[in-house]
Image (cartoon, rainbow, N blue to C red):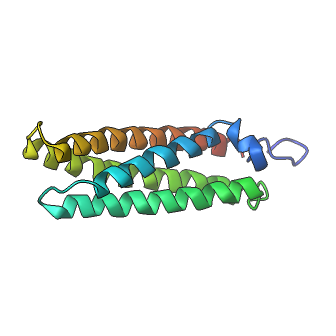
Amino acid sequence: MASDGRHLGHLPSGLTICCSIPDMLFLPELVFGGLVWILVACTYIVPYNPQAYVMAVSVFCFVCTFLWMMVFMCGSHNNRNSWATADVFYHFLASVLYLSASVPLAMVTLAYNSSLTLNYQLNISAVVFSYLTTLLYVIHTIFSAIRWKTF
């Protein structure tokens, strides 16, 4: 806090989320997360369990990120410190979930090892986008934590 009682940190609202770091990462997170969701839904690989988990993580994070983006766009956070804390926590959770889904998906894809089939190629694409989405969430977490420290 500044000496006159004002907060140094600021949470954006409205369309300013498209111009501020880390909030400009909302849209790429949604696009890449949606691609993971679609690509995993299009594949058929045994065992099903890792793919079911990847689907659950990608759908959960897609829905939560969309709702989180709407909260920021509407300005419902009222620039409170608790929302900045929750932003760091949510993006850290999403990072951990995506990483925990990306590793088994890559392992199952490598075990499948049939490069001539469409399922394998779709799964390779899902693995790449899953790791890119993980990276986006990690970057968002780091910059949200930096912003949180200014509150």
Q: In this image, 130 relative to 49: left or right?
A: right
**Residue 80 appears in view:** no
Residue at position x 79%, y 58% in the image: 78
Relative to 20, is 57 above or below? below
Q: Vertically, is 144 above or below 86?
A: above
When asked about the image quadrant of residue 18, the answer is: top right
How many numbered discs, if any?
Answer: 0
- Please state the horizontal and vertical placement of residue 89, each as a whole percent of the image: 53, 55
Q: Residue at x 52, y 41 (%)?
A: 28
Between 78 and 34, the one nearer to me in the picture: 34
Q: In the rendered view, would you say 71 is above or below 32?
A: below
Q: At 24% from the left edge and 58% from the top edge, which residue is drawn?
A: 51
Relative placement, left or right, of 117 versus 145 is left
Whether residue 58 sits left or right of residue 143 in the image: it is left
Q: Quadrant of the N terminus?
A: top right
Q: Is residue 70 visible?
A: yes
Q: Quadrant of residue 146?
A: top right
Horizontal relation, residue 144 to residue 6: left or right: left
The x, y position of residue 133, in whole percent, is 42, 43
Q: Nearer the viewer, residue 29 or 21?
A: 29
